[in-house]
Image (cartoon, rainbow, N blue to C red):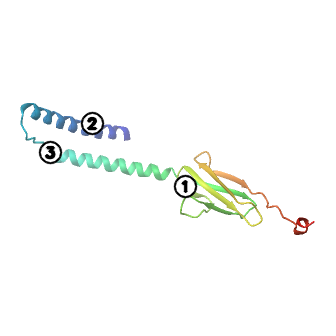
Amino acid sequence: MYNKNKAMILSTIMTAVITTLVIVLISFISGSDKVELEKPKKEKQETLKKEVKKIKKRTIKKQRQKLIKLKIITEPKNAKIRILNIKPKYKENIKLKPGKYKIEISKNGYITKKEWFEINENNNKLKIKLKKEKEIDINELFK
């Protein structure tokens, strides 16, 4: 249905373009410097506007359906999760468009991890394990 409507719109536009070119070409050949173009009929304009609105509505609906729930599981639990290249704060099952996201995981006593992840329908759950920071014994430094 979508392709049929799109084809109809493209056909109407192409017909108008070709008609205009033919009129301009004929007037050029005949030496006339006046070109009078016929306005499209009001009915055709209204039909075209309605079809464009329908296509826009379907496109918006499809874009909304493409949002993907993202779940990030961290070790240790309760690590801070941030998605650095978007404004909304991370919450479990946040809805995102498919794409690349830079994710930062941090927790006191652990090494912070920042990585780019590709989020899509098949890749929407991430398990990220942080490494513990090494503890330094000050006494060992001065031996």
| Quadrant occupied by the C terminus | bottom right
Label 2 close to label 3 by CB (< 8 Å):
no
Q: Which residue corresponds to mark 3?
A: 39
Q: Which of 24 and 77 is in front in this view?
A: 24
Q: Which residue corresponds to mark 2?
A: 11
| Quadrant occupied by the N terminus | top left
Q: Where residue 23 sits in the image (x, y, percent)?
A: 13, 35
* Residue type, label 1: Leu
- In the displayed structure, does residue 105 sit left or right of residue 3? right
Q: Where residue 55 sits in the image (x, y, percent)?
A: 36, 47
* Residue type, label 3: Lys
Residue at image x 54%, y 55%? 96
Label 2 close to label 1 by CB (< 8 Å):
no
Q: Which residue corresponds to mark 1?
A: 96
Residue at image x 12%, y 42%? 38
* Residue type, label 2: Ser
Secondary structure under the numbered disc 3 in the rendered image = loop
